[in-house]
Image (cartoon, rainbow, N blue to C red):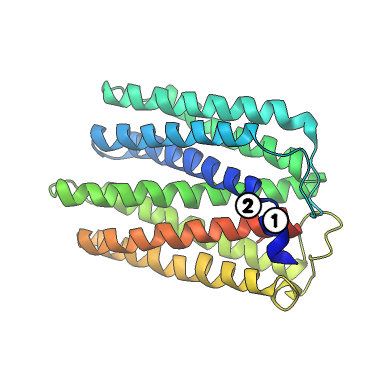
Amino acid sequence: MPAEQIASNLAFVNWTVLVGLAAGSLAAVVLLRRRTTATRGYLAFTAGCAAAFGVLAWLADGALPGTIVGSPVPVDPSWDGLRRGAVAVLAVAAGSVAVAVARGRTLARLGPLAAAVGPVVLAAAAAGWGGSPLGSVLLFGELLLLAGATGGVFAAMVLAHWYLVTPRLPEGPLVLLARWLVGIVGAQLGLFAVAAGLGLGAPGSPAVAAGFGVLTGPWALFAWLRLGVGLLFSFVLVWAALQTARTRSMESATGLLYIGVGTIAAGTILAAGCYFGGGLIL
């Protein structure tokens, strides 16, 4: 049963959420520091949160089982060392960025290096859990988008809340993050359409079916929830947050992004559950 397969592999779902929060929010901090006038207090706080998420991800990584129970997704242990080491570096990099920003540094060198650690973590994970070169590329693309959406919406929500206590902040930083989210969730919709239409996923997965067969098969409930809640509704929310940020309706933007945190996080959990439970790229 799909629900039982997802429940049996919640450790991998938890890992995906934590790494996504750490990598995505760190990348958002680096972007905002280099391209906007976001306050040092906000940037240091968000980078500190990314470091905390990174530590939790490292602890979660150490507790991952050696096999994925009842799932067609393979586990190649030869990538475990690189992945776990990269997760540790991600936590340290986020902490270093938090300290550097608090001291007023521009992150000219540290920022790009720190932001690059997240994709390294995701690439190592995709190589170990992809099952084939194509499967690894597909999984890397999905994990990268999940991280951008999950960490990005967390960073945007915190920033929107910052405006409520510092109303004179310019709207540019929040507009930039909202555009980021619109683009990423839009890309996730495109990946869903391609993967579901062509039947892409883990090699040999019985749940994978071309011609959008996943929307009518045994995984249909989770696929529809991923599409409806995690993607379509989330896209509407972040698009509306972008429009309200442009008009400086920051209370409305904050409320929309609070809801967006829930729907995007739910979508990430569903996407990870569908992959680790049934080998589906959604």
Residue 43 visible in rendering:
yes
What label sits on residue 4 in the rendered view?
none
Residue 280 visible in rendering:
no
What label sits on residue 275 in the rendered view?
1
Kind of element beneath mark 1: helix
- In the displayed structure image, the side of residue 92 where residue 225 appears, left or right: right
Q: How many tags in the picture?
A: 2
Q: Quadrant of residue 212?
A: bottom right
Residue 198, position in %: x, y?
76, 67
Q: Nearer the viewer, residue 108 or 78?
A: 78
Residue 14, position in %: x, y?
58, 46
Residue 234, position in %: x, y?
45, 65
Task: Tell me which amino acid carries mark 2.
Answer: Glu
Task: Tell me which amino acid carries mark 1.
Answer: Tyr
Q: Quadrant of residue 15?
A: top right
Q: Tell me: residue 227, above or below residue 188.
A: below
Q: Tell me: residue 43, above or below residue 190.
A: above
Q: In front: mark 1 or mark 2?
A: 1
Q: Residue extending furthest left?
A: 168
- In the displayed structure image, the side of residue 65 where residue 21 appears, left or right: left
The local crowd at label 1, few if under 14, some if 14 to 19, many if 20 or more residues have their Cα within 10 Å, is many
Q: Nearer the viewer, residue 228 or 219?
A: 219
- In the displayed structure image, the side of residue 187 where residue 221 appears, left or right: right
- In the displayed structure image, the side of residue 7 where residue 1 appears, left or right: right
What label sits on residue 142 in the rendered view?
2
Question: Residue placed at 75% from the left, 59% from the top?
Answer: 278
Location of the C terminus (image quadrant): bottom right
Answer with mark 1 or mark 2, whichever residue precedes in sequence.
2
The local crowd at label 2, few if under 14, some if 14 to 19, many if 20 or more residues have their Cα within 10 Å, is many
Residue 228, position in %: x, y?
53, 73
Check contact, mark 1 vs mark 2: CB within 8 A: yes
